[in-house]
Amino acid sequence: MSKKGGFLAGTIVGGLVAGAAALLFAPKTGEETRKEVAEKAGELYEKGAAVIEEKTGYDVNVAVDGLKEQAQVAKEQLEQKFVLDQDEQIDPTLFGLSDDDLKEGLSEQDAV
């Protein structure tokens, strides 16, 4: 990593640590602190994105939007794969259990 890149990374990390410490030790309610953390995170994101775009010409927001789309597609695929109809039963061997293990576990719950 170049000296400029290392300095930039150090500055960003240092800013994050200092900001987090300041927020954690401030005498405010939890709601006020969460709101301030969200605002500061947004500001930091915008500043960081501007610096990256200035230095590299790369728009970070494009990457973030692409990642959000990919995450949504993955979420939908997982939901489709694991959503069961009401009549379907889960195969206990999927979880390394036998039918006897499953019955034993259910009977133990009844005893509680």
Image: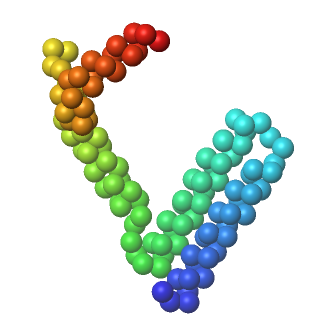
**In front: 43, or 109?**
109
Residue located 61% across and 70% down the image: 12
Residue located 54% across and 67% down the image: 48
Does residue 106 lie above or below 18 as drawn? above
> Given the current orientation, which residue lies at the most extreme top position?
110
Does residue 50 lie above or below 74 as drawn? below
**In front: 28, or 62?**
28
Q: Quadrant of residue 41?
A: bottom right
Residue located 39% across and 10% down the image: 110
**In front: 59, or 41?**
41
Horizontally, residue 26 falls left or right of residue 54, namely right
> What x and y, as percent, mark residue 24?
75, 50
Residue located 17% across and 28% down the image: 91
> Given the current orientation, which residue lies at the most extreme right position?
27
Residue 105: in sight, yes or no?
A: yes
Does residue 36 lie above or below 101 as drawn? below
Residue 80: in sight, yes or no?
A: no
